[in-house]
Amino acid sequence: MEEELPVVLVHRRPSATFVIPLKARLQAHFRVLDPCDSADDSHTFLARHGRSVRALLCASLAPLPADTLELLPSLELVVISTAGIDHVDLRFCRRRGITVTNASAALAEDAADHAVALLIDVLRRITAADRFVRAGSWPVKGEYPLGSKLRGKRVGIVGLGTIGSGIVKRLAALGCIISYTSRSKKPTVPFAYIGNVVELASNSDALIVCCPLTQGTHHIISEEVMRALGKGGVVVNVGRGALIDEERMVELLVRGELGGAGLDVFENEPDVPKELLELDHVILTPHSAVTTPESFRAVEDLIVDNFIAFFSNKPLLSVVQL
Amino acid sequence: MEEELPVVLVHRRPSATFVIPLKARLQAHFRVLDPCDSADDSHTFLARHGRSVRALLCASLAPLPADTLELLPSLELVVISTAGIDHVDLRFCRRRGITVTNASAALAEDAADHAVALLIDVLRRITAADRFVRAGSWPVKGEYPLGSKLRGKRVGIVGLGTIGSGIVKRLAALGCIISYTSRSKKPTVPFAYIGNVVELASNSDALIVCCPLTQGTHHIISEEVMRALGKGGVVVNVGRGALIDEERMVELLVRGELGGAGLDVFENEPDVPKELLELDHVILTPHSAVTTPESFRAVEDLIVDNFIAFFSNKPLLSVVQL
C-alpha cells in the first residue's frame, strides 16, 4: 500500500529539528523521502531518488541552489517552510515553471508582533532599562534617561506584504503615522506610498524592514537611506540581514549618526558584529521573530495542506509570485 | 502687579527636577510659592505661607499626608502631577471637600505602550534573547528557546480606567482575548467583565495591573490570584508596586509556579528584590512607563490648564473621583 502514496522529498540540513513532528504528519498522507534516513550523502540520495520527484519540501533554511534543483528534472512544486525565500534559487524555479509556496501567512503575526515590540523597545529603551535595573544602577543613579513616545512617530514600512500589513495594523493602534514603500502602490491601503526609499527615510522617524530579500532588495537600506533617516532615526529589521548594509549601519550606530536599531536578523548569522554587543540603543534577537509553538503548528498545517492540494489538483494556499 | 496674581503653592521634594520647566510656565499666570526657593524648612515654609493658599501643586511623588494638609486650611484644589495618586491622603481631601486632579489623561498612552511592550517582551522573551545574543551564546548554543504567540492569549485587565482602556485598544490589534475587572462593569465596553480577581486570573494567560493603589487595591494581586493564574501565567504591572504581594510573587517566580513578569513598579522603589535580578523570565524597568518628553509636556499643559480653569471658575480637566 505504501508504494501507492504520492512522494514528497525532504530537503534539509541534518541538524534541523523542525521537520520531526511535521514528518509524522506528512507520512499520514505521503511517502516521505528524507535523506537523513539514508546512509547516502545528500547528492547520492538525490541522484538516486530525484528523477521522478514532483514535490519537494525545503525545510528550515537549507539552501536550495540550481545544482541541487538540476537533480530533480520532474520537480513541479517547492514548498518552503519559512517566510523568507532567499535560500531557494527562485530564478531557476521561474525559468523551469516550478511553483513555489512559502509560510508567510502562518508566520506573519509573530513577525509583526516582534517588529512592533522591537520598535517600542528601542524607543522606550526597555531592554536597556532592564540592564540598568539588573546592574543595580537604579538606587545609585536615580532616574533612567527619558525614552521617546510612540504616538505621532512617523514609521516607514519597507515592504507591505503579509508581515508589513500586520505591522501597520498594530502601529495604527499605537497612534503612529504610517507610510510605506513596496514594489507597487497598494490601491486599497489608506497610507502614504513613497516609492523611493531615501525619500521614505527622510520622512520617517523609524523604518521597519520586512520585505523579501532578492537581488533587487539586497542592501536596500543603504548608507544613504540611513543618513536620510538621521541621527534620531531607528531601524527595525525582521526581514533578512542583507536587506541592510550592516557594516555601514554599525559604523553609523557607533558614531551616533543613527539613533538606534532593533535587529532580529544579521548578514552572517549566527555571527553578530561585535560592536553591536556593546551598544545600549540596540536590541538584538537571534532570528527569533517567528519562533512560537503556535506558529510552528500553523506552518505545519500550511505545508501539509499545500501538498494535499497539489496532489489532488486543487488550488495551492500560499503561492509565491515569482 | 505680581501681588495680584493668584497663588499656587508647590509641594515637592528638593531633588525633583520635574518641576523646573513647569515652574516657568506657571509663573506666567500665577505667583508660585516654592519651598525650594526659601531657606525655611518645609514645615516652617508652609506654616508661614499656607493659611491663605487655595491651590496646591503636588509635584512628582512627594508624599502629601494629612499633617501637611492640616497646615493649609484654605485649600480647595490639589493638582497631582502623576497618574498615581496614592502618595496623597485622599480620605483627608474627600472629608475636607478638596478637589483633586491627576495626570492620567496625559500619561495614559505611554503607560499603555509600556504595558503592551512588557507583555510582548515576556511572552516572546525579547530582553532575554538580547542577553543571549550579547553573551555570545547564539553561535555556541544555536536556536533560542521558543516564545509564546500573542494572538489568542487571554489577557485580564485589572483596572479599566484611562490607562487600561489604552491597553485594551492595543491588545485588540494583537489579537488577544480581553476580559477585565474594575470597580464596576462598564456598560459601553465590549469585553467580558469579571468582578472577582481570582476568577479573572483563572480565566487568563496574563494579567495587566493598571488600577490606582488604594486601601481597597493594596495587594489585590495576592498569592491566591497568582496561583489561579498558574505556572504558565504572566503578570505585568504598570500601576504601583504594592498592588502585588511582591514577596509572594518573587517566591512563585523563583519556584517556577508563575510563568513570568513584566514589572515597571516595585513595593520599595528604587530597591528591587535581588532574586528578580537573576531571573530570565522577568523584565524589570525603573518606574519608567511614563517618562517621555512628549508626555511631560502634555502633563505640564494639563497642570497649567487645571490651575487656569480653577482660578477662572471653569470646569477642571482631570478630576479624580474620590
Image (spheres, coloured by chain):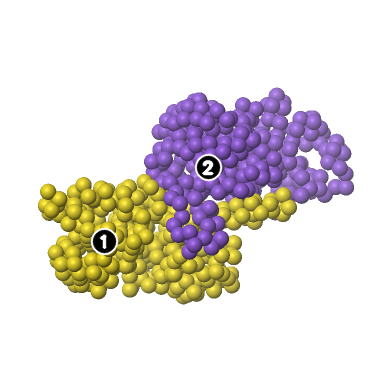
Chain colours: A yellow, B purple
Left/right of residue B190 with respect to residue A6 in the rendered view: right
| For residue A263, above or below residue B70 | below
Local packing at callout 2 (Cα closer than 10 Å; few below 14, some 14-19, many 20+) is many
Residue that label 1 marks: A38
Q: SS at mark 1?
A: loop
Q: Give the residue drawn at x 68%, y 30%.
A: B90
The mark lying in front, picked from 1 and 2, is 1
Q: Is residue A121 visible?
A: no
Specify the quadrant that holds the C terminus of chain A: bottom left
Q: Position of residue B39 (x, y in %)?
A: 88, 47
Q: Position of residue A276 (x, y in %)?
A: 55, 67
- Residue B53, located in which quarter of the rendered image? top right
Q: Is residue B226 visible?
A: yes
- Is disc 1 in the same subunit as disc 2? no
Q: Give the residue drawn at x 45%, y 59%.
A: B142
Tag 2, which chain? B
Depth check: give the residue in front, B205 or A191.
B205
Spatial CA distance of label 1 from label 2 is 43 Å
Depth check: give the residue in front, B46 or B263.
B263
- Residue A125, located in which quarter of the rendered image? bottom right
Left/right of residue B202 with respect to residue A298 in the rendered view: right
Q: SS at mark 2?
A: strand
Q: Give the residue drawn at x 33%, y 70%.
A: A214
Amino acid at circle 2:
Gly
Q: Which mark is residue B260?
A: 2
